[in-house]
Structure formats: C-alpha cells, structure tokens
Amino acid sequence: MRKICIALSKGGVAKSSTAVSVSHGIALSGKKVLLIDTDDQGQDAFLLGVKPKYGLADVLNERVSVEQALFQAREGLWVLSGGRGLSGVKRAIGRKDFSSEQALSESLYSIEGRFDFVIVDTSPSWDTLTINALFYCLEVLTPVSLEVLTLNSLVEFAERLKSVQKFNKKLQHTYLLPTFWDRRVKKSSEVLEQLKKYYSEQICEPVKYSVRISEAAGFGKTIYEYAPSSSGAKDYQKTVERILNYGR
Ligand SMILES: Nc1ncnc2c1ncn2[C@@H]1O[C@H](COP(=O)(O)OP(=O)(O)OP(=O)(O)O)[C@@H](O)[C@H]1O
Ligand SMILES: [Mg+2]
C-alpha cells in the first residue's frame, strides 16, 4: 500500500487540488484509492461534491470506526473527510503524554493493505496532524507554486521534514510538483529553472495555470470530469503516470 502525503507549510499552493486530481486519476487507472483530508478546512469532500456523514475527526475521537467513516466518492475512490471537528482533535492529540505523532497511524491500522494507494492531504501549517501524516506516510509530494516566496517555504519545509525522517526512516521526499506555471510570466519560468537545478530527481512536469481547475471546484467535479481535454487534466495525468511508474 503506497502512502503519499501531499504537503508544504504554505497556503494556496494547490495541495488540495493536487490531492483530489491525483487520487481520482489513480482511481481511474483501476487502482483502489483512499483520500484522507487532515485539514480542518475540509475542502477535499467539497471538491469531490460529496457530504460524508462522518470524517477523520470522528475516527480520531473514536466515535466511529474507520470502516464507518469511509465514504465512497467515485468508483475506486474513497474519502475520509476533514473539517472543523479536526481543530478539537488536534488539541486533544497535542495533550497526549506520549506517541502523539502516531495517533493517525494507530487509528488507521485496521485498513492497512486494503487500498493500493492512500493519499493524505494536509493543512498549510506544520501542525499536529501534518506531523502525524508524515509519520504515517512513506512518500511526500510537495506542490510548489512558482513564486519566489514559495521557494523559501520549500527550503524551510525540507529542513523540518529531515527532523521527521530521523524517526520515520522510510519517509522519502519523492516528488516536487511545480504548480500555477505560466510561461508568459518570466519569474514563473525562472523559479521553475531553479527547482529543476536543485531538485532534478524529484521534479515532475509542471501543472500550468488553468482556470478550468478552479472552475471544476465550484461544481464538485474533478478536472477529469469537468474538463477532460483541458491542460489541467493532461498535466495532472502526467503526475499520475509518474506516480504509477515509480521505481520502473
Ligand atoms: N493549476 C491551477 N490553475 C489555476 N488555479 C488553480 C490551479 N491549481 C489550483 N488552483 C486554484 O487555486 C486555489 C488554491 O488551490 P488549493 O485549495 O488546491 O490549494 P491548497 O494548497 O490546498 O490551499 P490551502 O493551503 O488553503 O489548503 C483554489 O481556488 C484552486 O481552485
Ligand atoms: Mg488545501
């Protein structure tokens, strides 16, 4: 079971758009996928146009079992939704005396091996649940919007990630996905060149700025449903193939 955390401690870099597009893309290839939203904004269910009765907060609170909270959003795609309830959960986890970073892993133990892929979306902050997600996952995919300020966040995030990797030794920073690429903007291409230079192994083909991606969000459809022939769908399909071909 591959477990991929979508993370960067910066807002609006397309973490949730990437988590949803990649999850659905992998599911469309015939794999069984679970998307877990650890953000209290709870955007993933919204992006998929679904309203699950229970979510991750109920599982972490031990109100319901994981099985009860799993919601099938599409063929081959299940979601464990985020949302406001997670704020209280984060405080409760923070108060635990020991292994507070393992709370998520422990609560998901019963579904180990049930999916081909688990994709975990995270909040823009380095909070308890982001750390828990990094202890649960084996790979990290970082979306990087092509702006200078995001590069600073990336450097800081990579440092923090190293501190987690000391404990979760299997965790690899496998992918860096440039987002909001606009070739008409000089800075956008300059930042892309820098990323290619420093992260030559992790760098994926960039996802271009595409108004279709933000439009799809308003309809509760994924980019493959809303605009299958758009650049957004094609770009995310390349990311999906890159992930599926890992190690080949
Ligand atoms: N390639 C793109 N082109 C144009 N708009 C995009 C693209 N990717 C994402 N967006 C839009 O940018 C906004 C931010 O995206 P998203 O919510 O995925 O980012 P995020 O990193 O999850 O944000 P947060 O840190 O708040 O969780 C959304 O309105 C989304 O629809
Ligand atoms: Mg998000």
Image: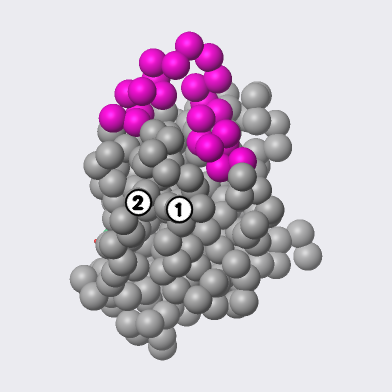
Q: Is residue 110 magenta?
A: no
Q: Quadrant of the N terminus?
A: bottom right
Q: Which image quadrant is residue 153 in?
A: top left
In the rendered picture of this protein, how many numbered marks are placed on residues? 2
Q: Which image quadrant is residue 231 in?
A: bottom left
Q: Which image quadrant is residue 94 in?
A: top left
Can residue 203 be seen in this snapshot? no
SS state under label 1? helix
Residue under pointer 1? 68
Residue under pointer 2? 54
Q: Is residue 100 magenta?
A: yes
Q: Which residues are magenta?
A: 88-109
> Do residues under tags 2 and 1 come within 8 Å of each other at their CB atoms?
yes
Q: Nearer the viewer, residue 189 or 14?
A: 14
Colouring rule applied to residues: one colour
Residue at the (65%, 48%) spot, across then down = 112
Q: Nearer the viewer, residue 52 or 130?
A: 52
In primary-sequence order, the first of circles 2 and 1 is 2
Measure how far apart labels 2 and 1 are at the Cα level: 8 Å
SS state under label 2? loop
Residue 131's tag is none
Mark 2 within 8 Å of ligand 2, using the beta carbon: no
Indicate the position of residue 34 as horizontal and vertical percent values: 52, 59
Residue 96 versus residue 201 in the image, above or below? above
Residue at the (51%, 30%) spot, across then down = 103
Indicate the position of residue 60 as horizontal and vertical percent values: 43, 36
Q: Image check: 190 left or right of 132?
A: left
Q: What predominant SS class does the magenta segment belong to?
A: helix
Indicate the position of residue 131 as horizontal and vertical percent values: 48, 31
Can residue 46 be seen in this snapshot? yes
